[in-house]
Image: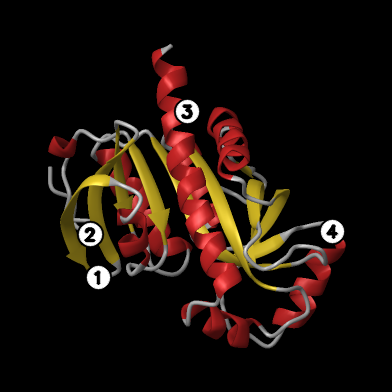
Amino acid sequence: MKQAHICLDETLGIRYAILPGDPARLDRIAKELTDVQELAYNREFRSLRGRYKGVDVLALSTGIGGSSAGIAVEELHNIGVSAAIRIGSCGALQKGIGLGELILVSGAVRDDGASKAYVPAIFPAVADFALYGCCKEAAKRVGAVTHEGICHSHESFYHEENEKESAYWSGKGVLGADMETAALFTIGRLRGMKTASILNNVVLYGEDTADAIGDYAGGESATARGERLEILTALEAFSLLEKGERA
């Protein structure tokens, strides 16, 4: 059945989905695929399909925030997608994480609203172990600089306590902040989907997030390289997962 928001149905027959936030990022994903076909574009949900090393992949943008990411996960599950990798941007919460370096997210602090609508916050938001392992190996293969650990998924990009909040979670060893990973992990787990999240650092710890995001949108070289590496890491991870599942 055609889904209400992503406007796709199960006839696609695709098991793997790469999930950027920005619809424009699909243009960069398409460069790494063959046999590319645009599919649908409704609200923040733009989609295309293509092949990477013989593996069929769906790319779907999710917009900003856990609520829209959650809608994407639910509707992807409904059409038969079994594994999804978020490729997003984040702000570093630790010194030593450079621009364009990737965070492979093992778990997320559930400080969002979407995941809490499903299950109490005591339920953990963690990546699928097998898919996470594929991401680790894939990152090595494409030559990405990576950091592994927890991210803080928050609810609002602009609010008065942002600096204080960042300092608190930094003190707990959290590596970066985004808005979607907790919803992806939680809803994906509840629906029996394999999920992983790869975050491209676009803000050095201690810098102003709004200014840095503006530079990222303008195509700064280090963060642009990081974006390509997270795309390649996710695609290579799907290739590894496909080989492992068919072995």
Evaluate whether residue 109 shows in this view: no
Which one is earlier in the sequence, the residue at label 1 or at label 4? 1
Which amino acid type corresponds to the residue marked 3 in the rendered image? Answer: Leu
Q: CA distance from mark 1 to mark 2?
A: 8 Å
Which residue is tagged 3? Answer: 240
Residue 52 lies left or right of residue 170; in this view the side is left
Q: Nearer the viewer, mark 3 or mark 2?
A: 3
| Furthest residue in direction right, as rendered | 171
Residue 114 x/y as whole percent = 48, 59
Which one is earlier in the sequence, the residue at label 3 or at label 1? 1
Q: How many numbered marks, from 0 up?
A: 4
Residue 90 against residue 231 in the figure, above or below: below
Which amino acid type corresponds to the residue marked 1 in the rendered image? Answer: Arg
Foreground residue, 233 or 188? 233
Which one is earlier in the sequence, the residue at label 1 or at label 2? 2
Residue at image point 42% right, 21% down: 243
Residue 187 lies left or right of residue 157; in this view the side is left
Residue 53 x/y as whole percent = 34, 33
Residue 162 lies left or right of residue 192; in this view the side is right
Say which element carries label 2.
loop
Residue 50 x/y as whole percent = 25, 44
Which residue is tagged 4? Answer: 172
- Could you tell me if the residues under marks 3 and 4 are in contact, i.e. CB atoms within 8 Å? no
Q: Quadrant of residue 159?
A: bottom right
Which residue is tagged 2? Answer: 5
